Amino acid sequence: MILSFQKVGKQYSALETAVHDVSFEVGAGEFTALAGPSGSGKTTLLNLAAGLDFASSGRVLFLGKDLSRLNKVELSQLRRDEIGFVFQSYNLFPVLTALENVEYPLALKGISPKDRKRAALRALEETGCGELHQRYPAALSGGQQQRVAIARAIVSLPRIVFADEPTANLDSHTAKKLLALFKELNTNRKITFLFSSHDPLVLNMAGRIIQVCDGQIKSDTQSKKPTVVMGPPEHSNSHLAAIQSRYSFGHS
Amino acid sequence: MDHYFLKLSWKNIWRNRRRTLLTINAIGFGVMALVALYNYYDGFHDQVIQNVIRYQSGHLLVTAPSYHTRMATNLVVTDPGPVDQWLATQEPVKAFSHRILVQGLVSTAQGSANIVFAGIEPEREKEVTRFAGNMVQGSYFGDTQQKSILLGSELAHLLQAEIGSKVVALTQGVDGSIGNELFFVGGIFETHSDFDKNMAFIRIQDARQLLSLSESAVHQIAIVLAGEEYLTAVQDQFLKTFSHSSSELQMLNWKEVQKPLMAMIELNKSANRLLMFIIIFVAALGIANSILMSILERTREFGVMLAIGTTKKEVVKMVIMETLLLSLVGVALGNLLGALVTQFFHYYGFDLAWLSSQKLVVQGTIIQTVSYPAIQWRNSLLISGIVFILSLIVSFIPIRHVSQLNPVKALRAI
């Protein structure tokens, strides 16, 4: 079990309750979506899961550790080592090239420049952006920027990737391609994904959908139909299986 | 953190090129002005000190105790022989000369004036002070046959004396008798200082005669050293050697003799230091402003950094690095320009006379306002160090802002 929410509540003020009495678990290898309309509490749940925010009640366990008991440095360490993030608006660092952006989490871990560059290039190739590694974010399309952001999220081999509305700013064609990539990484790299989204494309592909409404879980359903990849992957995945062993750092 | 974060910080400071360039120019101009000004004043102070050393006291003076404060004619070193012998063996001693100084009246048929008669050893004095090089008429004790006197140009004009004119010197001897002697004007000097109107040089034996002093008595032994750095060592050595006769001998360095001059230089330096702090503080505020603006513009980025595992300490380190890099570029530019300006004026001189219609007189010597400054690395180091320290201090505000960021709120920032 990677993540466990146990009767979690989050109240910002006496009048504003973001989530209420939420309990669910996310196991390794899952491809789960938190679904619900805007303001339903999806992003709050992701923030709580990543230790960016703290529950007002209940417990959030990450790999069995109660996040409320970790100090700020330990939480940073946890995010650095175990979690990848993909944001709605990509959030690449504009002054860095695609390659340098992907190198960032590895630089934080103190990986040597040579290993860092090699791993970042592989992650970029994996997400279909190998050719674009010298470009700055401003010179990339939205889809390309999100691919670079995914490369940044997976480069340090996290146990789980939190993706907050990752397709919200993309056209449907680009979104389909991107979802195919997510699924590919989930299937081949066994990376656990937890999305927040209300995009039907995402929900259609999710293996499990947790429906959130007004800060409460309304339903938690496993997808019965086999996942349909709704667009052809735009790059070869032949090297994906080998990538874990090729990285000479991080956990296995 | 390795060079990756250094590179990131470097790239961050160039996000807004125009703002960064403006900040760097402000720091650079401030540092340049300070480096050039400090170098100018160092050159100027050095020149003032050299003028006073080479026209008045020398580096060191040996006198009878309390002579310097009382200036009484009977306070003499009766036997300078042992001191002379000791000075001759001291390597740092470049030259030394005996002097008798006495106040008295000089008169011609056309006028009279109250002046100081300096009894000197002409050949030795030439090595100690520069008066010999300031003769505008006649010669520097060239005529050995008669009692020669050298007058300052203003004094000669007052007395309407010319080369060969007779002048009478009148003073009171140490025994209470009235001493008077007839001298012939052998030369007229011009130093552009008060010396030109209130000083006359005579041979030391004539001065002794005028004062009824013994054959070897002197008021001062003026000493010039090979360099300022030997001052303390020679003084200490003198104290050790002559401690048994310390009641009769005293050695003063030029700083002790020229206390008003030192006070003026110190005052000048204090004013410069104040100016330096004001200029650097203003430049540092520019840096803080630049960094604060840059931080406010990328609050969301800081949120992302924190979300993907950067600690606040690492973010703060990065902001500090940006502050230091910005300061470093400004300081490097300022020092380079400051060195160029200094080097230019080192060759062509810099004259501050246009700032004042008055002549600058210190201790009776007119100070030349033209300075030929030299590059002084200690000035550059001092100014640069203070820029870095003040920049970090005033960057406390942006650093505090970053350290208090809430990652969730930062991620929501536009």
Image: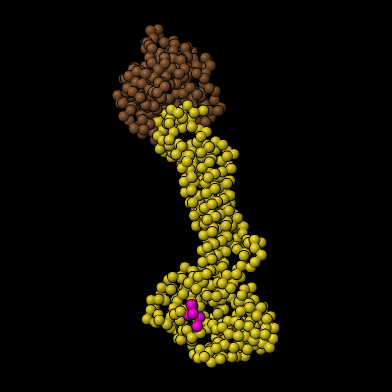
Chain colours: A brown, B yellow
Residue that appears at 52% across and 31% down = A94
| Residue situated furthest front in the rendering | A14
Residue B335, how many percent across, how many down?
Answer: 55, 52
Give percent across and percent down for residue A209. Answer: 40, 13
Q: Quadrant of the N terminus of chain A?
A: top left
Q: Report whether residue B108 is seen.
A: yes
Classify residue B305 by image quadrant.
top left
Looking at the rendering, the stretch of residues picked out in magenta corresponds to B67-72
Residue B111 image offset from top left, x and y in percent:
67, 85
Q: Is residue B101 magenta?
A: no
Q: Residue at x 55, y 75 (%)?
A: B56
Which residue occupies 53% across, 50% down?
Answer: B280
Task: Look at the picture and state if B69 lies above or below B228.
Answer: below
Q: Main secondary structure of the magenta part?
A: helix
Residue A116 appearing in the image? no
Q: Residue furthest bottom?
A: B177
Question: How many numbered marks does the figure carry?
Answer: 0
Residue B350 vs B292, above or below: the answer is below
Residue B68 within the magenta-colored segment of the rendering: yes
**Near-viewer residue (A77 or A155):** A77
Near-viewer residue (A141 or A185): A141
Towards the viewer: B331 or B178: B178
Q: Give coordinates of residue A25: x percent, y percent.
A: 33, 18
The residue at the far top in this view is: A225
Quadrant in which the C terminus of chain A is drawn: top left
B105 left or right of B79?
Answer: right
| Residue located 52% across and 49% down the image | B281
* Residue B31 position (above or below residue A70): below
Report whether B3 appears left or right of B357. Answer: left
